[in-house]
Image (cartoon, coloured by chain):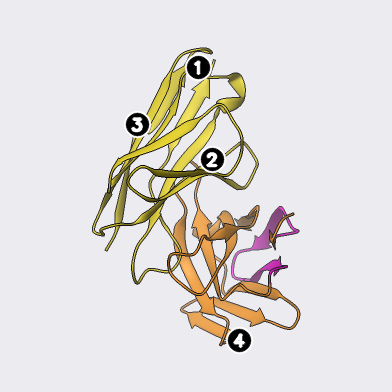
Amino acid sequence: SQTIHQWPATLVQPVGSPLSLECTVEGTSNPNLYWYRQAAGRGLQLLFYSVGIGQISSEVPQNLSASRPQDRQFILSSKKLLLSDSGFYLCAGTGTGLYGYTFGSGTRLTVV
Amino acid sequence: DQQVKQNSPSLSVQEGRISILNCDYTNSMFDYFLWYKKYPAEGPTFLISISSIKDKNEDGRFTVFLNKSAKHLSLHIVPSQPGDSAVYFCAASGETSYDKVIFGPGTSLSVIP
């Protein structure tokens, strides 16, 4: 079965600082990977998805970027955080034979 | 345009009674429907799903009903328990496991002891 690892669980960063959130996948090869954000009281907003190494699609224009340097590694980054980047960030993955997604445990980001 | 809608942002139910969470979708190409459950500060976990060729799927206390003609599905929880208190996301996908899953905005369920 597929397991999604995400860290850190909680992060407090000042405005203007950089960000790097990492997600790694166990149990499947060549998964599609996704970054979601859940803002306070809101649903799940798809930010980026990747169908393979080096392939990134952005769903919404924003201050963030994503990279996939390895098959099972997905990174969410920012050069300069904004207050509006605060939220709960979730990595998800899907692989052959699995419908729907497996989610990581999430990272609570607070930009102060 | 929101393809998956959950028009009730919150729902309160007494313990032991039935919880009914509703979901509507607009894209008739969706082939697979899922419900996820999410506790605060945790990732969503898969709860139950249904293929478009079925109209009902049951798993213990959870039953999902699909009405394709109305583009409507619902999740029934019977009997509701305090541990069911969480946000429930309705989601829909295409016919392959690599299709993107589209999530609704979620319904927050509170089960009152």
Disc 4 to disc 3, C-alpha distance: 41 Å
The answer to whether any part of residue B18 appears in the image is no
> What residue would you read off at disc 2?
A37
* Left/right of residue A11 with respect to residue B5 in the rendered view: left
What amino acid type should be assigned to the residue bearing mark 1? Answer: Lys
Q: Is residue B22 magenta?
A: yes
Label 4 element class: loop
What amino acid type should be assigned to the residue bearing mark 2? Answer: Arg
Decide: marks 2, 3 in contact (CB < 8 A)? no
Instruction: Give the vertical position of A86 relative to A31 (above or below).
Output: above
Which chain is depicted yellow? Answer: A
Q: Which residues are magenta?
A: B6-27
Label 2 element class: strand
Crowdedness of circle 3 by 10 Å Cα count: few (<14), some, many (20+)? some
Which chain is depicted orange? Answer: B
Disc 3 to disc 1, C-alpha distance: 18 Å
> What residue would you read off at disc 1?
A80
> What residue would you read off at disc 3?
A8
Q: Residue at x 59, y 31 (%)?
A: A62
Is the residue at mark 4 from the same chain as the one at mark 3? no
Q: Nearer the viewer, mark 3 or mark 1?
A: 1
Identify which residue, A31 or A14, lies in the foreground. A31
Instruction: Give the vertical position of A80 relative to B37 (above or below).
Output: above
The disc numbered 3 marks a residue on which chain? A
What amino acid type should be assigned to the residue bearing mark 4? Answer: Asp
* Left/right of residue A50 with respect to residue B34 in the rendered view: left
